[in-house]
């Protein structure tokens, strides 16, 4: 266990301190003024010293979602794309099939950990989340989908991204 812990710590120490991240909110109703989830991510990333390469809101429309994601995945700048919204089970929730179609190496642990953290807050309703993520673009960009609620995004940030984002990027740069 000591070797694994020291390896993880050495990776964190060697990880880049500034990550280039794009934030996409998927919603039929939110605007820049009312997007507390995407706005929170943008502010949290910048407060941690990261560069926000883009911040957009698109309707829950498959074509619009795919087009924006491909724009960032193909830009040779963005290292991570964080999405909020469209992860539920309603007819309008289109995000997950699109994200899954773009992933080359899924990271099932992200969704599993997110649901575990969510369970502590919302109980069994955590099962309704289809949060997912992994590597896209030949393993050159991380892509994650979170629910659109502010509490869900804050849970993902506080419990996962705040502490592991640099480490994740370090792993794809090796």
Image (spheres, rainbow, N blue to C red):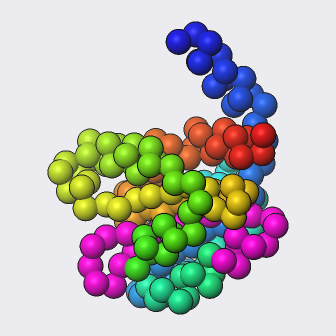
Q: Is residue 81 visible?
A: yes
Seen from this angle, which residue lies furthest left?
124
Q: Is residue 162 found left or right of 137 in the rendered image?
A: left
Q: How many numbered dots are placed on residues in this image?
A: 0
Residue at x-position 70% and y-position 70%: 73
Which quadrant is home to the C terminus? top right
Determine if the magenta segment contains residue 139. no
Residue at x-position 63% and y-position 81%: 68
Closer to the camera in the image, 97 or 39: 97
Q: Is residue 15 found left or right of 88 in the rendered image?
A: right
Q: Main secondary structure of the magenta part?
A: loop
Which percent across, then down, holds residue 169?
Answer: 70, 46
13 w.r.t. 32: above or below: above
What segment is highlighted magenta in the picture?
70-93
59 w.r.t. 159: above or below: below
Report which quarter residue 70 is drawn in. Answer: bottom right
Q: Is residue 43 visible?
A: no
Residue at x-position 72% and y-position 23%: 10
Determine if the magenta segment contains residue 77. yes
Which percent across, then down, holds residue 61?
Answer: 46, 88
Closer to the camera in the image, 32 or 156: 156
Q: Is residue 119 found left or right of 6 in the rendered image?
A: left
């Amino acid at each position: 266990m000591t070797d694994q812990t020291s390896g993880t710590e050495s990776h964190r120490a060697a990880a880049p301190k500034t990550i280039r991240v794009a934030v996409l909110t998927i919603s039929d109703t939110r605007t820049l003024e009312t997007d507390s989830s995407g706005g929170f991510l943008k502010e949290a990333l910048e407060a941690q010293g990261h560069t926000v390469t883009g911040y957009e809101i698109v309707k829950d429309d498959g074509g619009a979602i795919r087009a924006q994601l491909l724009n960032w995945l193909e830009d040779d700048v963005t290292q991570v794309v964080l999405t909020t919204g469209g992860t539920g089970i309603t007819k309008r929730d289109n995000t997950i099939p699109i994200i899954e179609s773009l992933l080359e190496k899924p990271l099932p642990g992200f969704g599993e950990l997110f649901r575990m953290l969510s369970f502590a807050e919302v109980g069994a309703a955590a099962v309704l989340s289809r949060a997912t993520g992994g590597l896209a673009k030949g393993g050159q960009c991380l892509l994650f989908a979170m629910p659109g609620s502010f509490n869900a995004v804050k849970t993902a940030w506080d419990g996962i991204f705040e502490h592991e984002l640099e480490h994740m990027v370090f792993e794809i740069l090796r």
